[in-house]
Image (tube, grey):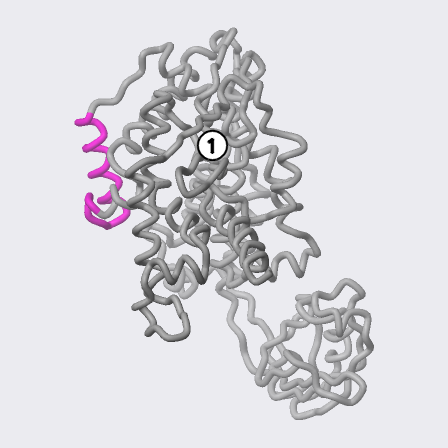
Amino acid sequence: MAKKVEEKEIEKETVKEEKKKAVKKDKNETVKEEKKETTKKESKKSVHEVVIKIEGETWKKAVDKAFLKKQKTAKVDGFRTGKVPRAIYEKHYGKESLFLDAADVVLQDAYVKALEESKLVPVVQPNVDLKSISEDAVEFTFKIVTKPEVKIKKYSGLKVTPGKVEVTDEEIEHEMGHLLERYTEEATKEDGVVEDGDIAVIDFEGFKDGVAFLGGKGENYSLEIGSNTFIPGFEEQVIGMKTGEEKDIHVTFPEDYGAKDLAGAPVVFKVKVNEIKHKITRELDEDFFDDLGMEGVNSEETLKNQIKKSIEAKKEVDVENQYIDAILEAVSKNVEVDIPQEMVDEEIDRLLHRFEDQLKMQGIALDLYYQFTQTTEKDLRNQLEKEAYSNVLYRLMLEEITNLEKIAVTDEEAVKESEELAKKYNVSKEDFLKEFGGLDMVKYDLEMRKTIEKLKELNK
């Protein structure tokens, strides 16, 4: 009976460890189940299954290594930890308890063998399943995805033209307004009350049913009236208060507020106004241009010229990006390719990690984002799928055009580019290459850029 229980525990461990030891794992089990139902069709020419069997002396040595690892922590009555003999260990735990660790020992070699025997070149990290495992051998099934065949019917003469860059007087005036606002000065209001547009420096503490709630307290907080940064109705009730005045402000949290215990709840904020400040609009005078510190800008005319150049530069980048996207979209309509879902999934992973990094820069954790937006990782992955598919399609398409046009980049060009970019980012060439992914990645990036320039020439 004890042995049956032990075997069941081993089976549980087998399921757990198989998931851990996959070369590529899907962290979201719901998404993983959906993939099984809707994607990864085995009929695709670019998806291959390779079975590798490890047996004989190689497998025996792997099991021996697994025992030495297990022996270090094995506990059996009558023996010190780390000193349990092999025969006693196997009698107590069963030989099967060594197999998964042994499989881990040979997994990498099995993968190398799979690539060598199949002559396949993977384009994404492969998945691996444990097909069978016993005292005599272990069998792995590697699912290897290779680059799909890309057929391009036409990629020239599509007559895609870039947009025009125009800067209006309204845009210049609008930007000047922002600039003046940015350099607006604040002065303490000695008399009077809080008015719309003023900055009220306040102490506040929020109470729900007479009990202070978490995150509802602040001291000397500068609240700009009209900014709508507080709960609806709060700022309006601060208007009319004097310096030193205290007041209870009654508001209700929105129904969709992130903290569920406060959503839709009526609360009271005890507020004290410590200081009132009003904004002083700057004039386009000598003091303002000195504060601005922009070389060559010392008058309204020179400022407008500088703003115009700045807007033009930004628009030129936007127009260029839109132009490239338009060319790629036009070419993609003439492309035939069967893209494996695995390639799209890996691109979704990349986009998801990039999005997470962007959130971190704003001090927001991904879990908190899901909570505030009331979404899940599955929802976000679904949102990213279209962009991920386009990214993969464009990459495959550009690689094929690179081959057709015989576009190449020399090592000398790549080295020069690495040196220039390292200088631009103020790092050593070695550190830049390490971060970028090596010289081959620099060459690949240059090839893609050259190919895009070629497409521009071919589609004027």
Q: Is residue 427 above or below residue 309?
A: below
Q: Is residue 246 above or below residue 280?
A: below
What's the residue type where badge 1 is placed?
Answer: Thr
| Residue sitting at x 39%, y 44% | 103
Residue 370 percent coordinates (x, y): 64, 56
| Residue sitting at x 48%, y 36% | 127
Q: Nearer the viewer, residue 167 or 218?
A: 218
Q: Nearer the viewer, residue 133 or 216?
A: 133
- Secondary structure beneath dot 1 equals strand
> Within the magenta stretch, is there residue 284?
no
Dividing the picture into quadrants, the one containing residue 209 is bottom right
Q: Is residue 149 left or right of residue 434?
A: right
Q: Is residue 2 left or right of residue 147?
A: right
Q: Is residue 31 above or below residue 206?
A: above
Residue 351 percent coordinates (x, y): 51, 42
Prevalent SS, magenta region: helix
Q: Nearer the viewer, residue 302 or 147?
A: 147
Q: Is residue 104 left or right of residue 330?
A: left
Q: Residue furthest left?
A: 412
| Residue sitting at x 57%, y 23% | 42
| Residue sitting at x 56%, y 48% | 173
Q: Please give the residue where the numbered disc 1 appears in the rendered image.
A: 141
Residue 2 percent coordinates (x, y): 57, 62
Q: How many marks?
A: 1
> Within the magenta stretch, is there residue 412?
yes
Dividing the picture into quadrants, the one containing residue 106 is top left
Quarter holding the N terminus?
A: bottom right
Q: Is residue 344 above or below residue 297?
A: above
Residue 364 percent coordinates (x, y): 54, 61
| Span colored in magenta | 411-430
Please tell me how crowded label 1 is: few (under 14), some (14-19), or many (20+) other residues with Cα within 10 Å: many
